[in-house]
Every structure is written in structure tokens, then in C-alpha cells.
Amino acid sequence: MKKTINLLLVLASNFFLSQNNFTRLTPKPADAKAIKITFSNSNSGFIINNNKELLSTNDKGVTWNLKQTLNFAPVDIKFRNNVGFIVGDNAVLRSEDYGATWTPVNIVGGASLNSINFINDDVVYISGQTKIFKSSDKGLTFPVNTTMNGMSAAITVFTNADTAIATTSDGRIQKTVDGGNTWVTTASATSFNVQYSSLVFPSQNVGFVSKGSGDMLKTTDGGQTWTPLSFNSFHYAAYGMQFLDENNGFAVGQNGIISKTTNGGDSWQQINAILMFGSDSDYDLNGLYFFDSQTAICTGNNGRTIKTQNGGATWMDYAPTYDLINEIHFTTPNTAYFRTSKAGFFKTSDAGNSWQKVQFPPHQGSLSNGFTFINDNVGYSIGTVQGSVLKTEDGAQTWSSSSVIQNNPLHSVSFASENVGYVSGGYSNSNGGLFKTTNGSTTWQKVSDMVFGKLNFFNANLGYGLKYEYQGQLYKTLDGGATWNVCLNVPVTSMIYDIINENQIFALVNNTNFYRSLDGGATWNQSQVPNLHFGKIKFIDQNIGYMATDTWVFKTTDGGVNWNMIYDNDSRFKIFNMEVGGDYLYLTGNGGRVYKYSLEFLSASEAIVNKKANVQIYPNPTSDYVHVDSKVKVKEIRLIDISGKMLKSVKDTSQISIAEYQSGMYFVEIVFNDNTKQVNKIIRK
């Protein structure tokens, strides 16, 4: 009998869990699109991003931290000596201590602000789409404003107190010589791509503008006329530019291109090693800061931050990786390995808090098509082309190879012990099939002609396999792969499944039909789910499990009958993998992302609330004590961070202090005398 699964997209008591509480392990300090980077002195630097975050460094980019979250979307940031500004829509922040502190500046009518220009130590212009604001007192006040009639400026650059060049949203370049009162058009777009992305003037007369797929223009007469440059031979858009002088400049942009010129833009040399292609512009660079011709930091999408100290000969990622993480496996609660789409292989020994790059399995002429680890040190990897199996016995420091099938890919791998394992590969021909080793991959023997896309063996004889073909069925063997029988005999167009032991199987078939078996596939319970295109499934016992789409994660506590959303990433990234390690649920995705959430806290937060308590928590936000007012006696109050870690606990009191902790979001878990619990979100100011 079918039961309808209740997918509660908005939960009255737990919806906040879906928004904020998977802790990002990497990349840090942010995974949002970086817009601009600048430095106020030789050591102090800042990055603004589209997640309203201001990042900072005090050691020339060796370390970066989240300095503060802004209440507006920043567009530009600039400094002149100790004075700096950040601008956005209807918002201006000013610093006079090299960015250590920021205070708001009131500008009436400052909608869609996008550009900051210092003329000298006293005079500064802040401009937007339709207005220009002028200050003569270092930006303390902006008493003068000018309306730019008939234009919508995207970027404005002042070359002196009266002269400015502006790019507009309709593809024009305009110039004023009277402080913005009147404008003339000096260039117009000749193609459909009219979005100018960068405008810089290294001197009063020489300027550069970039737009479209590699289009770049130059002026040598202060913006009166513009000449096309050869940068378009790269056919990649430049999203950011910086010139050290009229001749020496740099550009960053689409697919991570980094180029330099030493002759005023007449020719350009690519100085990044390779272009990085990814989904959704994963590798685009938008901001750059060159201290000199040798040392630079570039920033881009997914929080990507890279640094060179040798003129671009080599670049170092700030995070372990910004590549798509497409597979992760845990050997213990603390030890895990993941591989990336760009031949990266990483290991953690502290539950994902830090990652070290190890040796990627060196399959000849191909990448790894999947891997498994038996313990912290012994693991196996299968190849995409040559049909080889690589083995490591030292935690992916070195690998040794054995051949299974020539010139065919291997699709799946499963080891029941360090010595007994199975791989499957090839296609439906004499070369393809299922292969077995009993000596730790030294030799392989073909045991079946069947080809599987996924394998799960629990001992030398008992295993499950998803057939490698369209509409592939789930099969089971009891004799080490010699014979196979259909385990779930239903019509299949697509299937994802998870098996946690030899008896407990969970499968989602055709996107809507959920099946659970607790007796190795002999019998099945079925329920129905809405078609949300789930692509990942993971269970930790016969009742508690998780399914994920590209953006949502759902949890069941009754074996798949009912599901609740526990995470929504607002389409900020694509979830590629979901895994359980110890007491945590891990997600991986594009941009080098790894997130985790405490399963223990998930369970606690879903406890039945004591409605008779009528709890009131105040003040919220707070910087000191949190008071709990309850009609039912409170036994314990716990303070929990967003990763689910309990920070402190107090008993037989109605208040708890959070003064010693940093600003941010926390949870107060209230335990009543009858052991019912309630979880509330609290903000530390």
C-alpha cells in the first residue's frame, strides 16, 4: 500500500535549520563571488563579495578572515592613504584608519552607487547610475551632487576634478569636462554585447576599457577617441584590469584568464598556466591587486583567491581547492579523502577542518573514475580509459598499478576486505564484465559478463550491483559474482540507492517511488515522493536517512515515509556528493565546497517541543546574557554553535551568557524537567 511522503518545504519550528546551519569547511573565509580587492597599505587588504561580506587580511594575503557582514550589496571599494570607502545601493561606508573600522556616511539620493574616485587627499567623488556626489573634506560630508541626465552610468572614472569618463548600460562611453553637468558620447557599442566590465586610467590621458568576449579599447587623448586592442585574440572577457603605469598592466576574467602587457596594451601575454573551464563560470576572476610586477592577488567566483610571487609563473590557491569535488569517502570519523574534477586528491585527519593535498591516482592517460579506502592507508582507484586499478598502502602518498582490461573504462569498485575486491568495466562485449581479486589487486579474474555501474560487496560472496545501462536494475549475488538475480523487480528508468549493510537497502526509482528493504531485498515497502529530481541518498540506520537534490537536503526519521527539508542553499552552489562521517553529514560541490552538519544536533533540534512551556527568549540579538522565561521548569540551557558543537551548558538557572563568543548566530537548546527540548536561534551582536 502506497503512502504519500510529506515533503514539508517550510517547517514552522525548524525552517531556520535549512537556511544557515551547514557549516562550510572549505573554501574559507567565503565562497561567494568576489567583486573587488584592494589594499590600504602594504599589509592591510580587503575583498568585497556579492554575499554582502567584507573580508580582510593584515599580513599581505597570507590569511584572510571575515571582517564584517554588510547590510547592503557592495559594488566598489577604494583607499587613499588612511581614508577608504565602500559603496553600494543607497549606502556608503567610510574608514579613516586604513579599514580597521567603518562608519556610515549619509548621502541623500545615493541610489545605485558604483564608483569611488579620489582627486587628492581632500576631494573625493562618489557616483552612481544617475548622480555624482562631491566631498571636499575627505568624505565626511557630500554637500554637492550633480544629476547625470539621460544616462545610466555603470562605471565612472575621474581623471581630474572636472573631467570624467563613464561607461553606460546601453554601451556608450561618455565624457564630461565640467564635473558631470554635461556629457558627450565618445564611443558607442557596435555589437549586441554592450556590458563594459572594467574602466581604468593609469594617467590623465591614457585609459583602457574592456567589454564583451575579449573586446578592449584604449584612449591616449583622455577619452576623446578609442582604438581597439589585440586582447580580443584571446576571446575571453576581461572583468578586471590594473595598470602600474601607462605601459605595464594586467587583466583578469573569463575562465580564470590572467594576462599582462608591457607595451600599453599593444600585445598581451597569458600568465596563468592553464585556463580553467567549469560549470556556471566557476573559475572566472573579477578582481586583482598587483603590488608590483611580481606579487599579486586575484579573486573571483566561489570565493576563489589566488596569489603569485613570481610574476605569474606559479599561482597558489588560498583554499585547498576551488575545483568541483565529485567524490568523498570516510574511513573513520576523522579521516576522509576526496577527489576533484581537475585531478586533485585531498585528505583530512581532523573531520574536514583542514585538508592536505596527496598524490592523485596516476592512471595512464586518464583520470580516476572512482575510489574506495579500506582503512586510513589502504585504498583503490579505478581508471576512466585504461581499465587499470591503482592501489595505495600509505594514505595516497604513492600508488601501484594493476591491469584489468585494456583500453576500456572501469565503472565501479568495491572491496569487502583489504585483499578481496571487485571491479566492473568495459561494455557489453567480450572485454567487459565483473572482475575479482583475492590478493589485494595483484591479479584479477573475470567472474561474470555482467557490467555494473555501482557495486556494494559486504563479504567475499554477498554483494549488490546496479547494472551499467539505461534502465539498469539492482541485482544481488550470493556466490561472489558468479550468478546474479534481480533484487528489486520493478520498471526502472532511473535509480539511486544506498545499502548500509547486507540486509538494509534503500532505493529511489524513477524519481518518485521510494523502496525500503530490511531483509536483503526479499520484501520491500514502497512509498511515493514528489518528483524533485533527487540525485543523492544516504542512510545511517533503518529509519534515519537523507536525500538531496542539487540544492536541497531532506531527512526522514521513519524509514522514508515522511521527509523534512533540513537545508536549502538558495542555489548558491550545486551539491554533488553527500556522505556521513562519524556524527556529521557532509556535502560537497562545485567551487571546492565541503559543508558539514552535526547529526546529533539535527536529532536534538527535531525533538518534540513542550508546548506548555510557552518559552520566551530575550533579548535577541544580545551581546551579554540570554534570558529564558518558561512556564515549565528548565533543567538545562545549552549554547550550541552552527556546526552543532555544544559550547557551554548551565543547569538550574534561567539565563546563559554568550558574551565571550564572537558575533554571529548560535542556538540555545532548552532542556525541560521532563527531558523535552526546544531549540531557538540567537544572534550575538
Image: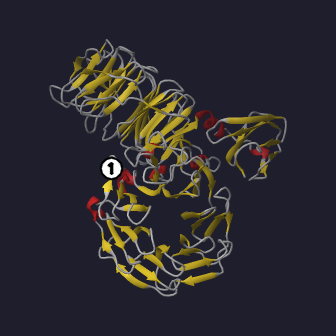
Q: Nearer the viewer, residue 294 or 610?
A: 294
The residue at the point 60 percent across, 78 percent down is 134
Q: Is residue 196 visible?
A: yes
Task: Report the side of 121 relative to 678 (left or right).
Answer: left
Instruction: Say if 229 sits above or below 12 in the image.
Output: below
Q: Nearer the viewer, residue 262 or 43?
A: 262
Instruction: Say if 517 sits above or below 151 in the image.
Output: above
Q: Position of residue 665 (x, y in %)?
A: 67, 48
Q: Position of residue 177 (x, y in %)?
A: 48, 84
How many callouts does the rendering have? Answer: 1
Q: Residue tagged by mark 1? A: 275
Instruction: Say if 347 sits above or below 658 in the image.
Output: above
Task: Report the side of 387 relative to 261 (left or right).
Answer: left
Task: Report the side of 399 relative to 684 (left or right).
Answer: left
Label 1's element?
loop
State the quadrant of the N terminus.
Answer: top left
Q: Amino acid at mark 1?
A: Leu
Q: Position of residue 293 (x, y in %)?
A: 42, 53
Q: Quadrant of residue 524?
A: top left
Q: Quadrant of residue 219?
A: bottom left
Q: Is residue 529 visible?
A: no
Instruction: Say if 611 sits above or below 636 in the image.
Output: below
